[in-house]
Image: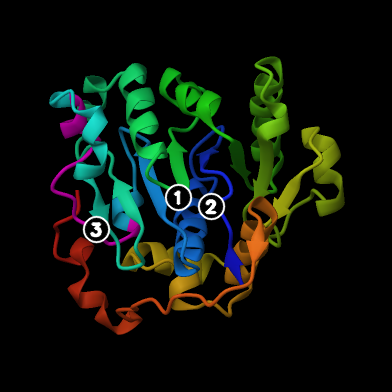
Amino acid sequence: MAIDTRKKRQIVAVCSATGGQGRTTVTVNLAAFLAARGSNVSIIDGDLQFGDLAMALDLDPILTIKEVAERDDSENSVNYYSTHSTGIDLLAAPKRPEHADMIDSKQISAVIDAIHGTSEVLFVETQAGLTDHALQVIEKADQILVTATPGMASLKNARLMIETFETLGLKDKVRLVINQSTASSVVKKSDIPELVKISEVFYLPYDSKHVSHSLDIGVPIVQSQPKLEFSKGIERLAKKLFAVERSASKKLPFRGLFRIKKSKRLRGKTE
């Protein structure tokens, strides 16, 4: 199976009301799944203070979105990419949280416009909450993925976020992704659509051991362990979000879990 994203170039915003809801996990694994099937995929880390996408892909960027802003060079944003072994192109967040103040929402918008035309799918992970930067991304998106967990507080906050999108006329673009959906919770899965007031809900299985490990070593779990239930959940999600066509998928390089000691984060190179 291959994902046919060429029919329409898409911007996909991945957001959440608070931190710890799975934005990075969903972003890197959806991107890796699509890249493995031949799609041209880019990611912008829009969590400008504490973005983890470079670490989640075991990349050590020399250039980031900070340098794009400093040089007023949004038209050439693709020249600031770091490229993952899967073929994913990442425009990383600044390496220091204080550098986030150097980037305004208009610059974010200009960067998205520049990259959108070069990618079949452009994922933008936003900061948690409804900041000006996040809303700038969300209003440009073709699809808005709101990530949450099955706890009551997370679902309440997701509902408030989605209600805000409805007031902005964006609700038709919103899909709710419940991370850790098989974790113990007082909330039944069947009750979630009514609680959050949204019909399109997708569920990813709970697998904290493998998911956390994949983030720690910088290898997307769909790349390293495609047969896990979590990886199958990502595949189902991708097929729902994007049109599907038949074709051979690329065989991607995999550096292996036994090379952990060589990981950049363990050498102290990732900030």
Q: Quadrant of residue 233?
A: bottom right
Q: Spatial distance from mark 3 to mark 2, Cα to Cα?
A: 27 Å
Is residue 223 at all visible to an observer of this figure? yes
Q: Which residue is mark 3?
A: 59
Where is residue 134 shown, x and y percent of the image? 46, 26
Task: Specify whether 95 is left or right of 226.
Answer: left
Above or below 258: residue 90: above
Q: Who's the residue at 70% across and 38% down the image?
A: 155
Residue placed under numbered mark 1 in the picture: 24
Q: Which residues are magenta?
A: 56-69
Q: Secondary structure at mark 1?
A: helix
Residue 136 screen position, x and y as percent: 46, 22
Q: Is residue 247 above or below residue 66?
A: below
Task: Point out the residue furthest to the front here.
Answer: 7
- In the rendered image, the vertical position of residue 15 relative to residue 136, given as above or below: below
The residue at 30%/33% (across/down) is 49
| Residue at 44 percent of width and 18 percent of height | 132
